[in-house]
Image: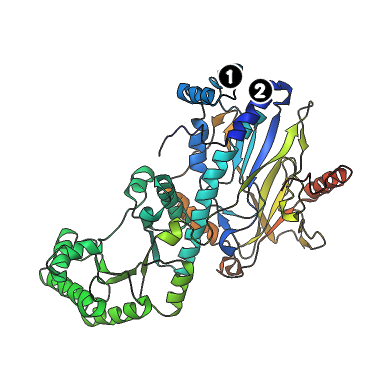
Amino acid sequence: MGKQNLTLLTDLYELTMMQGYFENKNQNETVIFDAFYRVNPFGGGYSIMAGLDQVIDYVRNLRFTEDDIAYLRSIGIFTEPFLEYLRDFRFTGDIYAIPEGTIIFPREPLVKVVAPIMQAQLMETAILNIINHQSLIATKAARICYAARGDGIMEFGLRRAQGPDAGTYGARAAVIGGCTGTSNVLCGQLFDVPVKGTHAHSWIMSFPDEYSAFKSYAELYPSACILLVDTYDTLKSGVPNAIRVFREMKERGVKLSYYGIRLDSGDLAYLSKEARKMLDDAGFPDAVISASNDLDEYLVDSLKTQGAAITSWGVGTNLITAKDNPSFGGVYKLAAIMGPDGKFIPKIKLSENTEKITNPGDKKIYRVYEKASGKIKADLICLTDEAFTEDKPLLLFDPLEPWKKTMLKTGTFTLREVMKPVFKNGECCYESPKVMDIRTSCQQEQATLWEETRRLVNPHQVYVDLSQKLYDTKISLLEQMSHVDVSSDNVEQ
């Protein structure tokens, strides 16, 4: 983790294609690849962009070491001239991307790579690996935080994550999505995010009795004293012993700045309400009640609806593994090839599935906001040589159902470009913000969504529209392809 050389984090076929382009040097044109996804995960109405910082680190360190080359030689399928070429391999192209923490929607480019095809092809697997995973976890976190209705969510999933990298970069993504911190200390060190935690049942069990365990812990950590009360009996033992310790500390003049209890089993709605009464009656109305135990957005939402007296939540397995939707589904597709005149020739991928037909050409994205509310109206994908302004009416239409059209009048909308330049001529020109600053901007981004889009079940889908010029280009390419053999045996799935 941190600064790593991930050059061989790729599928073998990327390297075999690279060698093919090397042997046919006239095929090593400058191309454009788009990384995008087709469907929002979790049945949601939006996703959260994450992972760009690691992509930047990956590209900066993209070079083949002597050990890498020796390993590739041992495979027995690469020629010496090609292996020699790899010694001086560096990325020399351009990359544009949507910043981390930004709301994203299906079919729009998240990362656009403009580079010789040998370079752009090699990067496919790593870019998808990074963006797919971290965007998935950030999106899951945003949903859970939305369900909590303003309560703090802590990411607690390291021990259940699929390995150290998934646990650490997943925790970073969870904070971007809205979590207030993580239990993962390495994530805290690497990315300067808050780390928090209490204690395990083993702490209680290692003492002669529950009271002694609570008292010892409270004396150690009076400024962050959250006691786990369900080791033996929550209401008959755990909460009364916690109250006893709080009272004794208060009588000794110890200031309890942040204190309370944690529930990790049982009927969380019932137990939290009963515990709240007991704490209030004992004179501790500001004591926190936190909860864990296989939580996700649906259970948190249900507990809030039931009036559970929980204001702090620790979410582990279901967040860090995105348990109900373990793959983001991002893809990386060729969009254009530079012709002899230096202009890009749009390329399109066909499929029998309409959703899988790609958007061709060199593209950019405008986000369209309703001026009165500041909410997202739609996203508009267009070609980079197009410009749209707020002082002219704007036509929007659904690219899948183009008869559905909306004309936005001047003065009713605002625009902003979403993608930012990240690399120019192989040099990074973008500085990633700190994670907690990305989290703040992500909160602001989510506030631009309509509540109908944020709801957990059957949300309204935001329109991702094409400009007329891009739409016409797409239709023209489809018509050209209709004159060649595109039977099911020859169509890429």
Residue 186 in view (yes/no): yes
Vertical position of residue 489 compared to residue 160: above or below? above
Q: Earlier in the sequence, mark 2 or mark 1?
A: 2
- In the displayed structure image, the side of residue 55 where residue 259 appears, left or right: left
Q: Residues within 10 Å of mark 1 (few under 14, many from 20)?
A: few
Q: Which of the pair 457/66 is nearer the observer? A: 66
Callout 2: helix, strand or loop?
helix
Residue at 59 percent across and 23 percent down: it is 78
Vertical position of residue 35 compared to residue 373: above or below? above
Q: Amino acid at mark 1?
A: Tyr
Q: Residues within 10 Å of mark 2 (few under 14, many from 20)?
A: some
Percent x, y of residue 257? 23, 64
Vertical position of residue 270 compared to residue 396: above or below? below
Q: Which of the pair 435/300 is nearer the observer? A: 300
Q: Which residue is mark 2?
A: 22
Q: Quadrant of the N terminus?
A: top left
Residue at 13 percent across and 69 percent down: it is 209
Residue at 71 percent across and 48 percent down: it is 493
Give residue 275's quadrant in the image. Answer: bottom left
Percent x, y of residue 179? 42, 58
Q: Which residue is mark 1?
A: 85
In this view, which residue lies farthest toward the right?
483
Q: Which of the pair 436/47 is nearer the observer? A: 47
Vertical position of residue 234 compared to residue 16: above or below? below
Q: Are marks 2 and 1 in contact (CB under 8 Å)?
A: yes
